Image (cartoon, rainbow, N blue to C red):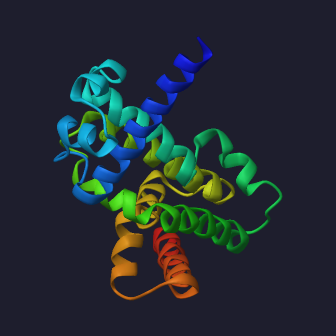
Amino acid sequence: MHKRAASREDTRARIVRATMQVHDEKGIGPATMSEIAERAGVGLATVLRHFPTYGQLVQTCGMHVWQELRPPVPDLAAAVFEGLDGRTARLARLVEELDGFYARGALRLRIAGRDRERVPEVAAFFAAVEAGIAAYVAEALRPEGVPQETLATVTAIMGFPVWSALEEAGLSGERLAETRLRLVTCAIASAGS
């Protein structure tokens, strides 16, 4: 009985690995269950026994990606900024946390972003990520008492599309972080004027 359960789990893991490989190569929306079965070295019926719908397979892969990328989580926002005094320290931590996440996940975030509107499970993944980003921004700026419009502006600046555009423009590492920190600081200052 234990051998059968272990074999079943091994097959399931092979299907998930194969799915993630196909997604990394083609994207999530264009991938097919047949391609995934072939990549995993199993029949289509085997894939469907483990994952009756493509959505269930995407969701399972999303859980693996979530653990791998460690995105910001609303429940952890307060702890991330605990003990930090002053705007500069809090904003530096905000940039550090989010830039680290984006650096870990850039490839997969770009691929998944292309299929966000086509695959509901991908849209749900991004909604959860964006809730975490918004919570981190709100917590970083909580002592400032900034207006909602400023929170929304800073959240947009701290989003993956801006990070990605700056990286594609040739900024990286400290330079990218410094640029984002300056953008956020300007957004806050312009709200006060």
Q: Residue at x 30, y 27 (%)?
A: 47
Q: Is residue 11 above or below residue 110?
A: above
Task: List x then y, in percent, for residue 52.
Answer: 28, 20
Q: Is residue 56 above or below residue 145?
A: above
Which residue is farthest right? 83
Q: Which of these two is toward me, 89 or 191? A: 89
Q: Residue at x 26, y 24 (%)?
A: 53
Judge whether residue 184 can be spotted in this image. yes
Classify residue 101 by image quadrant.
bottom right
Q: Is residue 84 above or below residue 163?
A: above
Judge whether residue 71 can be spotted in this image. no
Which residue is farthest top? 1
Q: Residue at x 28, y 51 (%)?
A: 22
Q: Is residue 89 left or right of residue 19?
A: right
Q: How many marks?
A: 0
Q: Is residue 43 left or right of residue 103?
A: left
Q: Which of these two is toward me, 20 or 7? A: 7
Task: List x then y, in percent, for residue 66.
Answer: 51, 45
Task: List x then y, in percent, for residue 171.
Answer: 44, 87
Q: Quadrant of the N terminus?
A: top right
Q: Is residue 143 left or right of residue 47?
A: right
Q: Which of these two is toward me, 161 or 17? A: 17
Q: Residue at x 52, y 63 (%)?
A: 104
Q: Is residue 52 above or below residue 185?
A: above
Task: List x then y, in percent, for residue 121.
Answer: 32, 35
